[in-house]
Amino acid sequence: MRLTRNTNLLVEPPSVATGDIAFNLIVFFLVCASTQPDSGRKQNIPKSESKEEQKQQSENIEVTLDRTGAAINGVRAAPVDFVPKLRRLLSTKTRPEDKIVVVKSSKDTPYHHWIAVTGMIDEAGGIVTLQLEEERTVMAP
Amino acid sequence: MKIARKKMRVEIPNVAMGDIAFNLLIFFVILARAQDDSHLKWEAAASAKVEAADNAKVSVLVDKDNKLYLNGRNVGESALAKEIESLLGTAPPGERIVLLKIHKETQAQRFEPIIEAVSEAGGDLVHVLEEKERTP
């Protein structure tokens, strides 16, 4: 009787490579995490001007914001009416500089409300510009 | 007759190389995270229409505590315009993107001067927002 020799050797994966595998996995997840892009909205805001130059823009549409609402040229507008009303007003303006909409916000206007309203101004075809109140310190004699 | 002494071979264990690389990587990841603004706490405002923003050199952030950060570094509002200008340098239009990350509850008296400072520095403003989920 002939005995057959068992030639199947035990093959183990080299444990030396474990560290390298972990390294490559981390690099992979790191690259995945760092390429997540930010999303948002572009906005072109004209540079600030002096008071004299602002006098020339007196015919621009003015949007006033407070904590919860918005008004176009002093008349309060509901969110659903805002875009059609502003679009109607802008349609009468032909020059690009007349399409500038001056946004005046009360101090307590939250950012999310400001973003919603300026988004609607963009949608209606207006160009947003800000009007800020200047604070001046007066030295008493 | 001299009997030759058996020489012992001393080798650096290769097994440790992966672990060393792993630790180095963690070190640099932590270092990099400290320089960006991903560790700051803020909530983006929602908008129906958002688009992917390009890569930006400059990021301005106002967190939940109303603190102002420029590229993850706490700065004052008065120095913001000049610092943005120096970071943007002579970059041409289109490469002067400034990401504006403002916490949604921040009030106008805080964020409007920041927007003005970005505009003054000649930056292309991009508001970082999250997409509003549309109801069917």
Image (spheres, coloured by chain):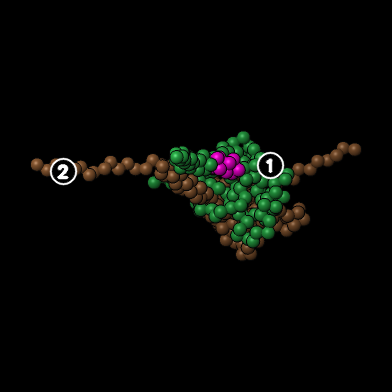
For mark 1, what is the residue?
Answer: B75
Q: x and y percent of residue A12 in the render?
A: 32, 41
For mark 2, what is the residue?
Answer: A4
Q: Quick check: is B29 in the magenta stretch?
A: yes
Q: Which residues are magenta?
A: B27-36
Q: Residue at x 70, y 41 (%)?
A: B76
Is residue A24 or residue A49 the one in the foreground? A24
Which element carries disc 1, helix, strand or loop?
loop
Q: Residue at x 39, y 46 (%)?
A: B136
Chain that is green in the image: B
Callout 2: chain: A
Q: x and y percent of residue A9 in the render?
A: 26, 43
Q: x and y percent of residue B15 in the render?
A: 44, 40
Quadrant placement of the N terminus of chain B: top left
Residue A74 visible here: no
Q: Amino acid at mark 2?
A: Thr
